[in-house]
Every structure is written in structure tokens, then in C-alpha cells.
Image (tube, rainbow, N blue to C red):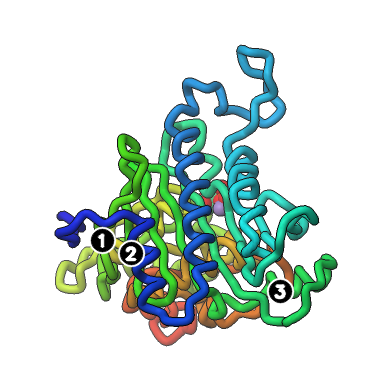
């Protein structure tokens, strides 16, 4: 199946600028932010591609053949994003999975009204084995008029509900590097061509299939799931061709890569709560919210099993949330089981 739906060669830079021109009054700040972020993604992509050669793979704190301190790729990616984004004058604060506290903009740089949240490297367990990893981000606007930069004020600005995102997206470092983003006007995908250093549009206004026979979950934790979820997992494994059952299982264990496949092929990706982790594993602010924004923009659905992800008001930067995301009908189906409206007697 080909997803290429653009008959023109359009670069990301050009696309972002032309989007801005469609909004009279737009200041262009946003355009600069996405440009800077695309640069960070290019740098991370380069490092991912040569990670094996560079000895960069490995635990932070190791020493490479040159006797230099080796940075683990997620620490490296974190620094690249911070250093690409802190001096543009458009952000007032950042929050990253790798930093316990908000990342202030250094005094020497101008501050702006935007807030960047990100997971610099998603899929850490796949770094050392050449399996797809990614970067996830969300962008918010500061809601107050103040220019206070104390931690409390900045933290309050970061923990806005996801529906307030003004943009969100991700990069995937897979067989090619792709950049996918939304500004609330649909979802667009770009593929990176390293020979010309450009992201080229290959799929405009992506729509997720309404329903598909794929599911994605760490089923190794089956014994810890609720009885309702067990019923769903047994239901979808039946031999019932007339209902497109059984579903096919796909699980990469890089959340953003599992999401990317789900966006294109449809189906359900979930990281549920279990008896050991009542809130699941994924983080609301910089994992679930950006993906939920993209899913909805593509016509899909994202909930914690009951509530819309984008409506949840975070109470802290790093809080976890159960996630059910993907094709609308697949997410509604699992929700019906979780509510007890649908049952399946498998015992
Ligand atoms: P991160 O690498 O940013 O810590 O995130 C890892 C997450 C996510 O990418 C993936 O969906 C999940 O961990 C996989 O967890 P399990 O190994 O428990 O399945
Ligand atoms: Mn992650
Ligand atoms: Mn991470």
C-alpha cells in the first residue's frame, strides 16, 4: 500500500511558511519554532544513523574509544533539543521526560509566549538493537500575561490540558526519518531526504481508518490486567472471519512507532493500567497528549478508557495515564468492554 498522496515536491520549511500565510495576523513565531525543532530532529537523526559507528550506544557514563564520556542517546537527544530551542526568543519554558523540573530559558536569551514539552527519545529499550525510536513534542501558549519565571508559575503553565495544544507531532527514526505534525488543521507527514537535508511532504491530511483488525499492547502483562480487559483480549482472538476476528497483534515497544503504524493502518494501541501500575506507564504531558491531539486530528480517538485524554487536567509534569488510542471504532469497542457494556465469557 502506498501512502504517498502528494504529487508535488514540497519541503517542510515551505509547507510551514505557507501555512502561516493562510492565517493573517500570524506572527511567524510559530513558524520559527517548528523550523528550530526540525533542525533538532535532523541532528538527532544524524546521530541515530551513526550511533553504532560513534560508540554512542550504551549507558550514559561509559567511555568511548577516544576516552571521551559517552552520552546515552536519550541524554544526547535531550541536549540537542534544549540547545536548539532555548535561544530563539519564542519559548518561556520547556519540559522534558529527561528533566525532573521545568527547563527555564537562560537569562541571557529573550523569552516568548510558547511552551514546549517533549520526550526526546521514545523507545529507549530499542536504542541498542536498531529498532525504530522517536521524539514526541507538544506546544502550548502561555495563558497569563505575566513574564514571571519562578518555577511555580512555569510549572502551572506547563500542566495545561492537552486540548490547549497549539501544535504537536513526532519524529520517527526508522527505515527513514519521518516528521509528523499537526497545528489543529489536520495531520501532515514528511520524509527526510538526508542527501538534500530536507523533509519532503509525502502525506497531506492523514486520516486514520475508522476500524482495522490490529491491536497493540504488552500482552505479557495479561495476568495483571482487569477482568474487563482480559475479556476484550479474549474476544478479539476468536476465529470469526465475519467480524474480522482474530485481530493481528503488533507491538514494537516504542510507543510512538506503534502509534505511527496505527495512524496509517488503523487499529488500537494501548498501554493500560494494571494491578502493579494503576496509571499505566506512559506520561500524559509529553507522550499521551501529543499523540492524542494527532489521533483526533486524523479522525481517531484517544482516551484513558473512560475520559478523553485531551480533557484531563494534569497535576504534575510527569504523571502517567492509561492510554487507548487509534481508530475510533476500535477504541470505542475496548471502552465498551471496560465499562462492562460488552462482555465475553472466556473462562
Ligand atoms: P521511553 O523510552 O521514553 O521511556 O518510553 C518507553 C515507553 C513507550 O515508548 C512504550 O510504549 C513503552 O515504554 C513500552 O513499555 P513496555 O516495555 O512495558 O511494554
Ligand atoms: Mn517515551
Ligand atoms: Mn524517552
Residue 330: mark: none
Q: What residue sits right under mark 2 in the picture?
A: 188
Q: How far apart are marks 2 and 1 (CA)?
A: 6 Å
Tell me the residue at 72%/56% (across/down): 109
Q: Earlier in the sequence, mark 2 or mark 3?
A: 3
Question: Does the beta carbon of the residue at mark 2 sit less than 8 Å from ligand 2?
Answer: no
Q: Which of 213 and 205 is in front in this view?
A: 205
Question: Is 347 left, or right, of 40 in this rendering?
Answer: left
Against 104, residue 335 (above or below) is below
Sequence-earlier tag: 3 or 1: 3
Q: Position of residue 30 (x, y in %)?
A: 51, 67
Image point (37%, 76%), residue name: 185
What percent of the width, then of the height, locates residue 197?
36, 41
Residue position marked by numbered label 1 in the rendering: 203
Q: Which of marks 2 and 1 is nearer the N terminus?
A: 2
Q: From the viewer's side, name the closer residue of 269 and 257.
A: 257
Amino acid at each position: 500500500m502506498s501512502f504517498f498522496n502528494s504529487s508535488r515536491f514540497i519541503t517542510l520549511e515551505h509547507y510551514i511558511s505557507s501555512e502561516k500565510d493562510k492565517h493573517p495576523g500570524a506572527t511567524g513565531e510559530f513558524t520559527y519554532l517548528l523550523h528550530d525543532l526540525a533542525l533538532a530532529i535532523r541532528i538527532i537523526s544524524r546521530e541515530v544513523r551513526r550511533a553504532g559507528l560513534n560508540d554512542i550506544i550504551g549507558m550514559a557514563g561509559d567511555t568511548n574509544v577516544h576516552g571521551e564520556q559517552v552520552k546515552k542517546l536519550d541524554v544526547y537527544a535531550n541536549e540537542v533539543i534544549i540547545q536548539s530551542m532555548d535561544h530563539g526568543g519564542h519559548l518561556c519554558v520547556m519540559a522534558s521526560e529527561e528533566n525532573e523540573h521545568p527547563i527555564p530559558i537562560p537569562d541571557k536569551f529573550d523569552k516568548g509566549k510558547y511552551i514546549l514539552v517533549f520526550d526526546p527519545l521514545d523507545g529507549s529499550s530499542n536504542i541498542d538493537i536498531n529498532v525504530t525510536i522517536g521524539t514526541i513534542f507538544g506546544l502550548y501558549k502561555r495563558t497569563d500575561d505575566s513574564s514571571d519565571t519562578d518555577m511555580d508559575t512555569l510549572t502551572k503553565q506547563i500542566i495545561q490540558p492537552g486540548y490547549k495544544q497549539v501544535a504537536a507531532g513526532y519524529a520517527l527514526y526508522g527505515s527513514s526519518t519521518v516528521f509528523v505534525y499537526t497545528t489543529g488543521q489536520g495531520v501532515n507527514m514528511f520524509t527526510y531526504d538526508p542527501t538534500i537535508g530536507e523533509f519532503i511532504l509525502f502525506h497531506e491530511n492523514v486520516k486514520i481508518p475508522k476500524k482495522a483488525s490490529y491491536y497493540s499492547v504488552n500482552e505479557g502483562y495479561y495476568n495483571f490486567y482487569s477482568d474487563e480487559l482480559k475479556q476484550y483480549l479474549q474476544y478479539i482472538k476468536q476465529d470469526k472471519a465475519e467480524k474480522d476476528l482474530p485481530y493481528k497483534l503488533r507491538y514494537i515497544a516504542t510507543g510512538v512507532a506503534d502509534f505511527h503504524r496505527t495512524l496509517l493502518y488503523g487499529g488500537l494501541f494501548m498501554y493500560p493500567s494494571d494491578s502493579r501500575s494503576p496509571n499505566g506507564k506512559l506520561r500524559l504531558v509529553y507522550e499521551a497528549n501529543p499523540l492524542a491531539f494527532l489521533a483526533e486530528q486524523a479522525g481517531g480517538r484517544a482516551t484513558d478508557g473512560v475520559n478523553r485524554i485531551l480533557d484531563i487536567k494534569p497535576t504534575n509534569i510527569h504523571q502517567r495515564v492509561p492510554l487507548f488510542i487509534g481508530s475510533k471504532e476500535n477504541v470505542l469497542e475496548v471502552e465498551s468492554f471496560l465499562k462492562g457494556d460488552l462482555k465475553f465469557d472466556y473462562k
